[in-house]
Image (cartoon, rainbow, N blue to C red):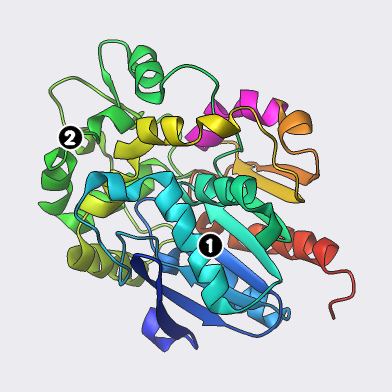
Amino acid sequence: MSDSLPFLHCSADVGDARIHWVECGTGPVVLMVHGFPESWYSWRHQLPALAAAGYRAVAMDVRGYGRSSKPRAVEDYRMVRVVADVVGLIRALGSDDVTLVGHDWGAPIAWTTALLRPDLLRGVAGLSVPYAPPARSGRPLERMRAMAGDNEFYVEYFQTPGRAESEIEADVRRWLLGFYWCASGDVRNGPNISIVPRGRKLGDQFVFPDAMPAWLSEADLDVYTREFEYSGFFGPLCRYRNVDRDYDDLAGFAGQPITIPALFIGGDRDGPTIWGQPAIERFPETLPKLTRAVILPGCGHWTQQERATETNTLLLEFLAGLHPAHP
């Protein structure tokens, strides 16, 4: 349970949002950004490991989640607003030695922060979603609709406010369990939950485990369920509802590389890593200071939870290279 862990809960106003984070340890800052549908708690295995190694480990709740602000306008969840939250939090932490780590949607948030504000960061790491520079052409929703054919890509399914919320919030705990399980590396030849048949719900395709997997206990699922029963899903889903706005907002950075040291960790059973293979092949151009790109065998989408030990080892190796004089 998160309440039994020696974590400090903090909040601060950063621009137009109030951001909640959890931290432990002292030293250079490692700021971790979660994805969908998760929270700061997704980094529960990394927080103590990084703190024990001499780092100030910080895990934030992205706007719309947990105890962070929950704006009611869809456009308030565009990427540039979320990046502004990260920048504001870095300033609130009062450190000039920050490494940013993101998973799932947190990876594009981390990559984009490194693209727009490399001056604030010592390094950046992305889990699951590889870095792809802002596109020069082809609006995201148009490309996703073409990819799904007669069906709906899940990002398209999430577009209409209220539609996915009503499905999920009918039974938050069961929906989360199905989503987590079906996207994990434990399910081989399972349903393709990235594609939703027209007229159906995403959760209609879910299968469920006979017993909880080693990486997700009943108590862990309880924590996530409480977080989302409190916060709801409008904010989290609005990140998907801004992909075309992001395309417009970031057009001036189309094709640009990230110029600070970088790390990528993916799983060979993770959809975004598999779809992102063309982006991974371009890393020599797009991440010229990449230290490693590691694909974990048998790992699904929930990288730092499914493979906590390997993720911690890779992060600490990356951090050691960034801080050669750090004890």
x%, y% of residue 17?
A: 34, 66
Classified by dominant secondary structure, the portion drawn in magenta counts as helix
Residue 199 vs residue 60, the one in the foreground: 60
Q: Quadrant of residue 69?
A: bottom left
**Dot 2: element:** loop
Q: Residue at x 10, y 46 (%)?
A: 166
Residue type at numbered disc 2:
Thr
Highlighted magenta segment, given as a residue range: 270-281
Quarter of the picture holding the N terminus:
bottom left
Q: Residue at x 71, y 49 (%)?
A: 263
Left/right placement of residue 47 relative to residue 12 reads right
- Find disc 2 in the rendering and name its residue: 160
Which mark is nearer the camera, 1 or 2? 1
Q: Quadrant of residue 321?
A: bottom right
x%, y% of residue 241?
A: 29, 38
Residue 279 vs residue 306, the one in the foreground: 279
**Dot 1: element:** helix
Q: Is residue 253 above or below residue 65?
A: above
Magenta highlight on residue 232:
no
Residues packed near mark 1 inside 10 Å, few (<14), some (14 to 19) or many (20 plus): some
Q: Is residue 51 above or below residue 229?
A: below
Q: Is residue 280 above or below residue 65?
A: above
Magenta highlight on residue 280:
yes
- Residue 208 appearing in the image: no
Left/right placement of residue 45 relative to residue 160 reads right
Q: Residue at x 37, y 47 (%)?
A: 181
Residue 3 vs residue 36, the one in the foreground: 36
- Residue 87: numbered disc: 1
- Residue 75 appearing in the image: yes
x%, y% of residue 199?
A: 12, 22
Label 1 to label 2: alpha-carbon separation: 29 Å
